[in-house]
Image (tube, helix red, strand yellow):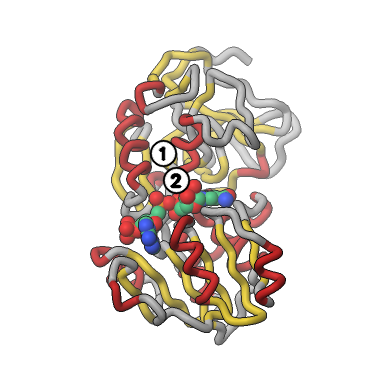
Amino acid sequence: MSNGTMKAVRFHEYGGLEKLVVEEVARPTPKPTEVLIRMKSAGVNPADWKFRAGYMKAFAPIPLPWTSGLDGAGIIEAVGAEVKGLRPGQAVFGIITGSYAEYAVAGAGDVVPKPDHLSFDQAAAIPVGALTAWQAIVEDAQVRSGQRVLVLGAAGGVGLFGVQFARDRGARVTGTASAENLAYVRSIGAEEALDYRSPALAGKLVDFDVVFDTVGGETLEAAWKMVKRGGHLLSVAGMVDAKQGESLGINAKYTGRAATLHLPRIAELLQAKKVAPRVGKLFPLSDARKAQELSQTGHGGGRIVLHIAD
Ligand SMILES: NC(=O)c1ccc[n+]([C@@H]2O[C@H](COP(=O)([O-])OP(=O)(O)OC[C@H]3O[C@@H](n4cnc5c(N)ncnc54)[C@H](OP(=O)(O)O)[C@@H]3O)[C@@H](O)[C@H]2O)c1
């Protein structure tokens, strides 16, 4: 199937923001097990600029030129011959590689129908963040009712789902964020929201059953003291020494995004309004550089989203 051209945001070599260019390229063609999606919105994840900068090339090599973007939402334009259960015209969201473009292909199992009450921009703010939090809170820690869960970086694109999944499972949640995001963190179910810049925080955060770190660096180092013996320390933002965990009696692990087979369950929670995304700032596709520049600050105010088409 040859279906004309489209605008896509790509980079031809690793480097700074200036490497991102909007180009007119051929629309992709879905394989038999894939769908072609007319993109409405794309999530802007920290991984996008890390890929562009070349930080991931050792363990996740990509062919260049590369179209940025890992997730998003749009309308199915065409389905491959073997695809069942999805049809052209359906609104979907999910893991869509190369989502910074007017069209992208995705595995049929990597997208699910978009809940009607969510806009495309809201749906695009979900997949990577929600699947990553799902892996830590639901799959790895198997958070249970009554447990105390600490989410470090609770207002971020991953952390905000960590808070909501833990709360939905009946845990008592504490979240850290900057002062301007504390009210938001409480609004999504945290009993306690604490300013990570406050000097009063040191020594206050102890005895958690589960600590979910989305910040890394010094925050992750300090997190070891916050977990109780037998508890879980899970980070998606920094390497974790499992041996150190063994010696302390802590289940410590670097973890990552869950498989897309968990997307339908996440969609159910969204549909039931038990969890909700938070769109940070919106940018047009042509401003992808500005969007990644904001993402690089680590203070996107939720998930930054590229609004591709109305
Ligand atoms: N391993 C994986 O598979 C995987 C998957 C997804 C993401 N990640 C990684 O996880 C990290 C978070 O991703 P994200 O999408 O949630 O990023 P994000 O949307 O940019 O959020 C980062 C959050 O961190 C908060 N923050 C910054 N410094 C903090 C500190 N010292 N203490 C507590 N919170 C702090 C910010 O809060 P304020 O704005 O309130 O300051 C912001 O809400 C990134 O490093 C990303 O690459 C890994």
Report x, y in % for residue 288: 35, 31
From mark 1 to mark 2, how far is it between C-alphas? 6 Å
Residue 159 in which image quadrant: bottom left
- For this orientation, the residue located farthest to the right is 82
Report x, y in % for residue 184: 31, 67
* 26 up-or-down from 215: above or below: above
Quarter of the picture holding the C terminus: top left
Numbered badge on residue 70: none
Viewed as shown, does residue 101 lie left or right of 198? Answer: right
Sequence-first tag of 1 and 2: 1
Residue 126 appears in view = no
Numbered badge on residue 124: 2
* 64 up-or-down from 262: above or below: above
Q: Residue at x 43, y 76 (%)?
A: 174
Q: Which residue is mark 1?
A: 41
Q: Amino acid at mark 1?
A: Ser
Report x, y in % for residue 299: 32, 51
Residue 101 appears in view = yes
Q: Nearer the viewer, residue 253 or 155?
A: 253
Decide if ligand 1 comes within 8 Å of the CB at mark 2.
no
Q: Are marks 1 and 2 in contact (CB under 8 Å)?
A: yes
Helix, strand or loop at mark 1: strand
Helix, strand or loop at mark 2: helix
